[in-house]
């Protein structure tokens, strides 16, 4: 190697050593997206996004019926919401949420833990479960019932990973979005009785908790039907650890934040429906 070549190589290495942040910055965006995409896949929310159309249709039907309104074009609003909460859009919005306060080392360390056994095995079970499997979970359990011990173990897991509370909050957010879209009456002009009715409609009833709990347990029993009791206990231990708690809270914040942001986007878009040139921030991001 010629002296000049050696000098250039040494100079380049010296500059890189003095400015590691520049080296990291060159690949930070690409690396961050890869890690966040992996995190979302591991979070188990891709299968849950498949449940959104059913929740939207049911919530919209109940809200319109309870409001006794005839001014809402239900078919048009349904199409708008289903398009807004498309799995690609939800995933993108969730990625945006997770990018806030992103810590590469923390995320990467968590993913490495998720790729261990049996955590990875149970995550794969969740990812392989389809919305149809979940929808038919109760019927499947009638044909192949489980023991009380197994159901108790699954319930403990759902308490540790926050799945039931997360499902309830998902229903609550969509209920709030839909309720706001179909009830545009000036509340200042409502009677006290009407205001009371509006308040009751603004949040899911306690009866929803029983239904969601039952459905979530049934879905988990089907999802983890091939997992051993010992594997489930280890999975519970993971969620009870510091890493598991961070994983639970981070994925919930990303998912629920995405649902809220999309809801605000839909409301804003409907308000500007007469202006065909207006695009939401999410549409602009997706180049739609």
Image: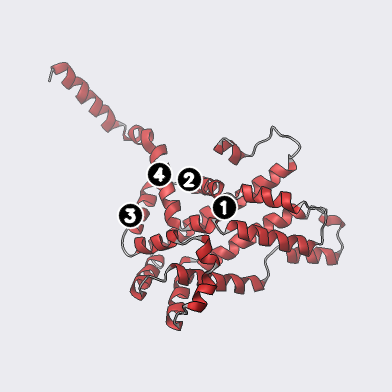
Quarter holding the N terminus?
A: top left
Which badge, 4 or 1, comes first in the chain's sequence?
4
Q: Nearer the viewer, mark 2 or mark 3?
A: 3
Left or right position of 288 against 116: right
Which residue does the numbered mark 1 point to in the structure image?
A: 257
**Crowd around label 2: few <14 · some 14–19 · many ≥20 (10 Å):** some
Q: Earlier in the sequence, mark 3 or mark 4?
A: 4
What is the C-alpha distance between the residues marked 2 and 3?
A: 19 Å
Q: Label 3 belongs to which residue?
A: 112
Figure coloring = secondary structure
Residue visible at 72% across and 61% down in the picture: 61
Judged from this view, the residue extending furthest toward the bottom is 148
The disc, 2 or 3, on the residue closer to the chain's N-terminal end is 2
Q: Look at discs 4 and 1 and give the one toward the viewer.
A: 4
The reply to whether residue 103 is visible in this rendering is no
Label pair 4/2, CB-CB below 8 angstroms: no
Task: Tell me the element at label 1.
Answer: helix
Q: Which mark is residue 34?
A: 4
Q: Quadrant of residue 205?
A: bottom right
Closest to the observer, 189 or 83: 83
Residue 147 in picture, x, y percent from top left = 44, 82
């Amino acid at each position: 190697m010629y002296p000049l070549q050696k000098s250039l190589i040494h100079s380049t290495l010296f500059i890189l050593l003095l400015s590691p942040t520049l080296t990291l910055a060159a690949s930070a965006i690409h690396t961050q997206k890869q890690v966040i995409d992996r995190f979302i896949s591991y979070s188990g929310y891709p299968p849950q996004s498949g449940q959104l159309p059913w929740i939207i249709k049911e919530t919209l039907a109940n809200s319109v019926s309870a409001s006794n309104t005839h001014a809402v074009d239900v078919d048009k609003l349904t199409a708008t919401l289903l398009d807004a909460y498309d799995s690609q859009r939800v995933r993108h919005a969730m990625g945006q949420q997770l990018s806030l306060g992103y810590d590469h080392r923390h995320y990467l360390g968590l993913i490495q833990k998720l790729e261990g056994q049996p955590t990875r095995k149970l995550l794969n079970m969740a990812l392989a479960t389809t919305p149809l499997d979940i929808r038919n979970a109760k019927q499947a359990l009638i044909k192949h019932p489980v023991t009380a011990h197994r159901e108790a173990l699954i319930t403990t897991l759902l308490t540790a990973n926050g799945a039931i509370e997360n499902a309830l909050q998902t229903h609550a957010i969509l209920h709030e979005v839909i309720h706001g879209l179909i009830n545009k009456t000036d509340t200042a002009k409502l009677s006290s009785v009407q205001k009371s009715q509006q308040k009751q409609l603004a949040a899911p009833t306690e009866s929803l908790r029983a239904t969601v709990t039952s459905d979530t347990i049934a879905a988990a029993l089907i999802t983890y039907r091939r997992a051993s009791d010992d594997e489930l206990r280890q999975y519970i231990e993971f969620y009870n650890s510091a890493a598991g708690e961070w994983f639970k809270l981070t994925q919930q914040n990303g998912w629920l934040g995405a649902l809220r942001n999309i809801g605000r986007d839909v409301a804003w878009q409907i308000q500007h429906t007469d202006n065909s040139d207006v695009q939401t921030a999410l549409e602009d991001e997706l180049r739609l």
